[in-house]
Image (cartoon, rainbow, N blue to C red):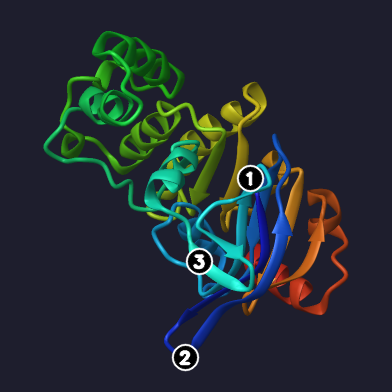
């Protein structure tokens, strides 16, 4: 995926200001930086939950939400967007599960209705994923009967059930009790180690970012101020803003 001169404004507030960066297939890229620096907005643009105000977002070199026709910047039709969006999965901070459905129903809903898989095929895949995230015994529970950590593991399985090529992770542990954070991070670590899914993560879990990522981008005021491999970023950052941020975060 590639961002080319992407601009995003909320009223007079410029959140992304001519942003340029790219993520190669199979990369695990973590976005770090203070709250309000534009990190989550990037994920929301990729899920088309927000619209950009300028620039191009490309997936496999093809414009995703807007394109230039001559000098004109125009929206891409929804049908074309949907084809690409089905290749992108997202795990949200607040789980976003359907409370009126069981765990299994949550996972098979989109594969059946969006990917047009047979129910039997979707159930087989769901059971594999529930095994992977350690939630097999909860398959027939309603999601509101689960703890936060259990709900987040179901949310991860639901995202993976769409067989995404790109997985977006937005502060997936910030709503969890500290003692269950490790369980969820363990699931994500295994996915990173055993699949070739491209990952774009927003997290304040610096140790996790260090272990899972192959690149870390430091954001501030809608711009990348530093980019490095995890070892360099966390042990020898060069930009003063990165040093300040990491000092504050790692002190907790």
Tag 2 residue: 12
Give the number of the disc on residue 74: 3
Residue at left offset 50%, top offset 57%: 65
- Observer-side mark, 1 or 3, equals 3
Element type at mark 3: strand
Element type at mark 2: loop
Q: Is residue 238 visible?
A: yes
Give the number of the disc on residue 208: 1
72 and 241: which one is in front? Answer: 72
| 72 with respect to 238 (left or right) | left
Across and down, in percent, residue 232 comes to 86, 55
Across and down, in percent, residue 30 comes to 65, 52
Q: Quadrant of residue 136?
A: top left
Q: How many numbered marks appear?
A: 3
Q: Quadrant of residue 16?
A: bottom right
Crowd class of label 1 (few under 14; some 14 to 19; many from 20; radius 10 Å): some
């Amino acid at each position: 995926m590639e961002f080319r001169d992407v601009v995003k404004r909320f009223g007079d507030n410029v959140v992304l200001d001519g942003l340029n960066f790219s993520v190669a297939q199979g990369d695990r890229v973590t976005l770090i930086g203070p709250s309000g620096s534009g990190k989550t907005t990037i994920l929301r643009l990729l899920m088309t939950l927000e619209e950009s105000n300028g620039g191009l977002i490309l997936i496999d070199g093809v414009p995703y939400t807007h394109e230039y026709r001559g000098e004109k910047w125009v929206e891409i039709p929804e049908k074309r967007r949907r084809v690409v969006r089905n290749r992108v999965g997202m795990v949200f901070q607040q789980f976003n599960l359907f409370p009126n459905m069981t765990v299994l129903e949550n996972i098979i809903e989109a594969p059946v209705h969006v990917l047009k898989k047979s129910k039997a095929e979707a159930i087989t895949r769901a059971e594999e994923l529930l095994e992977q995230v350690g939630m097999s015994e909860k398959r027939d529970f309603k999601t509101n009967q689960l703890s936060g950590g259990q709900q987040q593991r179901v949310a991860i399985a639901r995202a993976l059930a769409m067989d995404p090529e790109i997985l977006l992770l937005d502060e997936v542990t910030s709503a969890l009790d500290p003692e269950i954070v490790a369980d969820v991070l363990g699931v994500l670590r295994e996915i990173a180690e055993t699949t070739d899914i491209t990952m774009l993560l927003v997290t304040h879990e610096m140790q996790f970012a260090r272990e899972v990522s192959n690149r870390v981008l430091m954001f501030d005021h809608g711009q990348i101020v530093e980019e490095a491999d995890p070892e360099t970023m966390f042990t020898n950052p060069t930009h003063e803003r990165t040093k300040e941020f990491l000092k504050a975060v790692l002190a907790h």
